[in-house]
Image (cartoon, grey):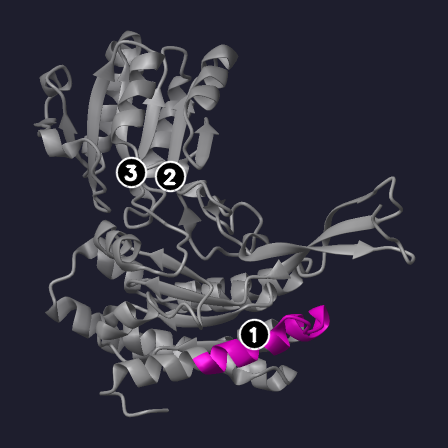
Amino acid sequence: MNDLSDIPSVMHELGRRARAAAADLAFAPAEVKRAALEAAADALAAHEAEVLEANAQDLAFARDKGLSDAMIDRLTLDGSRIAGICDSLRAVAAQDDPVGATIAEWDRPTGLHIRRVRTPLGVVGVIYESRPNVTADAGALCLKSGNAVILRGGSESFHTSSAIHKCLVEGLKSAGLPEDAIQLVPTRDRAAVSEMLTMTQHIDVIVPRGGKGLVSLVQREARVPVFAHLEGIVHIYLDAAADPVKALDVVMNAKTRRTGICGAAECLLIHRDALDTIGQGVVRALIDAGVEVRGDATLQAIEGVQAAADDDWGREYLDMIIAARVVDDIDAAIGHIRTYGSSHTECIVTEDDAAAARFFERLDSAILMRNASTQFADGGEFGMGAEIGIATGKMHARGPVGAEQLTSFKYLVEGDGTTRA
């Protein structure tokens, strides 16, 4: 590796090595990739103590920087969370290999037989912030889909990500795959991010995973194509026909289970006809649970509700805070979401099939839910084993990005001495 003070040289060497590794991974047998991921999970379990020690260093660094409790929670690992990461690695390993799978095939009157098959993207660059599990998730999904990956974790998780990365490399080595298939940027220097964004000769796609500042920077400066993972400005709409028990369960879980993840609810919309019954009960339950409710003028009549400011609409708190507003009908709710949403995840709580159908039809967020907590907005919960992020754009990948979404396709065309007239 080059002198770490020479960031361009360091990054281009990473890119060169990743490109070479990608050439081998493109045709690596499915069973070899599976073995590498299973060995990585075994290594992570075996090195739990070292990973926790590294995590303690990062937590001390994060507290010195004054990170919020929610961000500290995102960064924190314990035995159960490491076990969860191991489970995700094994779940990705067990999935069908997407590379080479036939998407469609057909015959032409000319005698040609045409197949469209999945093929790796090549080299993926992942830029993420404090969640160290992304190191394992992104590494696993890229390997499963035959891609080499360059990981640039957040400065807060530097030691933890490095410890997890060593386990991934151990898995690669044990399976005889190139160690350069999963590389971690070895510096906290932010210049490494700027360099990644312009490495068009080495990187095929960039996946940013973090807050609005990071994603905006990537979208603004990247010359490499981007799978954008924007803010999780997640809305829950309580319809007039909402079931009160479901409404309470869904809202409380969506807001309070883990406030620092992108699927956490950030705005509650309440149909005016449900305000005096379901709405009041849910708002009071939130306040009793320690959530700061910032409401519109109508909701401020409920004791404990604070006044919402203009910038509370369309805001990702990642904390025990939620904005709340009363709407006249479902179309007003849809209009609010269209105005303030980030196209991530929205939920309607209703027993009215027509209302649910209208909500699903007229909103175009990546994930739309009915009567289910928005904390299910997660690739693992979708059966993908893990996710590299939730793409909120409309090109190529959308919603949870798993191994299949990290592939492109090519056409395989066969003839029998066939010529065109």
Which residue is at the front of the view, 146 or 94?
146
> Sequence-wise, which precedes: disc 2 or disc 3?
3
Identify the residue under disc 2: 344
> What is the x, y in percent for residue 343?
36, 36
> What is the x, y in percent for residue 393?
40, 43
Predominant SS along the magenta part:
helix
Instruction: Give SS at disc 2.
Output: loop
> Sequence-wise, which precedes: disc 3 or disc 1?
1
Which residue shows up at 57% across the image and 81% down it?
A: 172
Quadrant of the rendered image containing residue 342 = top left
Residue farthest toward the front in the current orientation of the protein: 421
> What is the x, y in percent for residue 140?
53, 67
Amino acid type shown at disc 3 = Ile
Q: Given contact means CB atoms under 8 Å apart, are the residues at marks 2 and 3 in contact?
A: yes
Identify the residue under disc 1: 22
Residue 48 is at least partly visible in this image: no
CA neighbours of label 1 inside 10 A, class few (<14), some (14 to 19), many (20+): many
Give, as a single range, the part of the protein colored magenta.
16-34
Amino acid type shown at disc 2 = His
Identify the residue under disc 3: 233
